[in-house]
Amino acid sequence: MAIFPFLSVEPTVQVGDRTRLDGTKSFVTVDEGDIISLEIDPGNGSYVNVTTDKFLDYAWNTSGSKTIRCRVTTETASASASISESISVVTESSDYLFSTDSDLKLHEPDILKWTEDGRNSFLNIHRRAKKLILEYLRREGFVDVYGNAYTDAAIIDVEEVKQWSTFTTLRLIFEGISNSTEDVFHEKAKRYFEMEQKWRSIALLRLDIDGDGVVIEGEGIDARSCFVARR
């Protein structure tokens, strides 16, 4: 009676970064019989048969918007249905993350063994950390001279927020791994949360508060208060 292809993808991924195009939640009604074929097109117009695993791990070498398709075919008269999702593939420079996996390794040398299935980096978590930092500045009332919330473009020198981002990322990773308030991952998450707060509280950000793309001496904010200065 019906075929329901389902495709789960990350909204944003960097060029060269591994990601999983996941069709495992696809299903059909009982009258359709078995699924005889599940295929995924990673955006190049060519379907790959992934009937066994029901997912495709992939990486792109060019940036841009990619249209991903999942097609399910059943044994009933070889009926099929498809669905599509979009992924934004960005360059490292346009992604403009505040920390890297190398920064994590300084504190957790074997951190990459905890990456999610289908990934070989924590770039997605670094991206989440950046969003949380910018959300914190907005929530605490930090705005530029025009009253607008700061974007990542206002942070000219990522060194000003690198430690803050690193410990936020580590905290998010171990919170995701932990499944008990008594396990070692929960303790690591607590410790990195304390470091996150420490570096957030002492961060003196050199921000481009007027949007001219240049930070001059004395221009910026103190993350310990809502003080904004340009001398």
Image (cartoon, grey):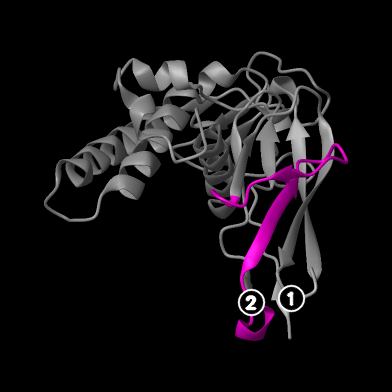
Q: From this view, report whether residue 24 is shown above or below residue 186.
A: below
Residue 34 highlighted magenta (yes or no): yes
Is residue 140 among what the camera can see?
yes
**Quarter location, residue 187:** top left
Query: Helix, strand or loop at disc 2?
Result: loop
Left or right: where 110 falls relative to 227: left
- Location of the N terminus (image quadrant): bottom right
Residue displayed at 70% across by 70% down:
75
Is residue 150 among what the camera can see?
no
Q: In the rendered image, which residue does mark 1 sit on?
A: 76
N-term mark: 1 or 2: 2
Task: Tell me the number on the disc at residue 33.
Answer: 2
What span is in magenta? Answer: 28-54
Q: From this view, report whether residue 47 is shown above or below residue 23.
A: above
Task: Tell me the number on the disc at residue 182.
Answer: none
Asked if disc 1 and disc 2 are in contact, CB closer than 8 Å, the reply is yes
Q: Position of residue 149 (x, y in %)?
A: 70, 46
Residue displayed at 85% across by 36% down:
44
Q: Where is residue 193 in the image (x, y as percent from the top left)?
A: 30, 41
Left or right: where 220 falls relative to 161: right
Label 1, label 2: how far apart the Cα atoms are:
6 Å
Give the class, few, some or many, for how many residues have Cα within 10 Å of label 2's Cα (few <14, many ≥20). Answer: few
Circle 2: residue type: Gly
